[in-house]
Amino acid sequence: MDEPARLTIGDLARATGTKVVTIRYYEKAGLLPRPPRSARNYRIYAPEHLHRLRFVRRCRALGFTLDQVRELLSLSSRTDRECAEVDGLAKAHQAAVEAKIADLERLAAELRRISNLCQGGRMADCRIIEALSS
């Protein structure tokens, strides 16, 4: 399917599932280049904006920070270089995600443990409150 040569901000938002305010934010943050304006001062986006926004959205969906996305965008524009830097950034992010998962698994286990202490009854005898207080 051919992409239109000119897109409004609404078209871009619909095509990527992104809110208009987020597109404007990404422009201000330097993740999307500012588009040219029409005679009526409307933003006019090109297919390159669409591709770049899809890249940004995918990175964000994978949990990359805005600074990491900015770095990935910068690295992706250097097509003649080795991709070791990108690989390193992805592996570091993967390690951080796995560490968060491990923390969440420990948290879930502790919540299961204290929830299992509940025997019903009165608040004065609540084992969960007691466990949280210790």
Image (cartoon, rainbow, N blue to C red):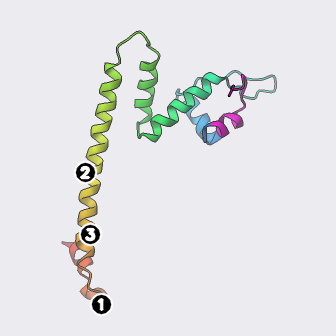
Which residues, given as a range, are shown in magenta? 1-15
Estimate the spatial distance between the alpha carbons at disc 3 and disc 2, rounded to whole Å: 15 Å
* Residue kind at label 3, given as amino acid type: Arg
Residue 86, located in which quarter of the rendered image? Answer: top left
Structural distance between the alpha carbons of marks 2 and 1:
34 Å
In contact (CB < 8 Å): disc 1 and disc 3: no
Q: For this view, does 14 lie left or right of residue 66?
A: right
Labels 2 & 1 near each other (Cβ < 8 A):
no
Residue found 41% across the figure and 36% down from its top: 65
Residue shown at 28%/44% (left/top)? 98
Position of 71 compared to 57: left or right? left
Residue 3 visible in this rendered orientation of the protein: yes
Q: Which residue is mark 1?
A: 121
Left or right, 1 with reference to 89: right
| Residue count near mark 2 (Cα–Cα under 10 Å), binned few <14, some 14–19, many ≥20 | few
- Which element type, helix, strand or loop, lies under badge 1? loop
Residue at image mark 3 = 112
- Of all residues, the one furthest to the right in this rendering is 40
Q: Nearer the viewer, residue 31 or 11?
A: 11
Q: What label does residue 102 carry, if any?
A: 2
Hey, which residue is sitting farthest left in the picture?
Answer: 134
Element assignment for label 2:
helix
The first of marks 2 and 1 along the sequence is 2
Q: In the image, what residue occupies the spot 68% across and 25% down?
A: 45
Q: Residue at x 77, y 23 (%)?
A: 38
Q: Position of residue 130 (x, y in %)?
A: 22, 78
- For badge 2, the amino acid type reads Ala
Indicate which disc, 3 or 2, sits on the residue closer to the N terminus.
Answer: 2
Percent of width and height locating residue 134:
18, 72
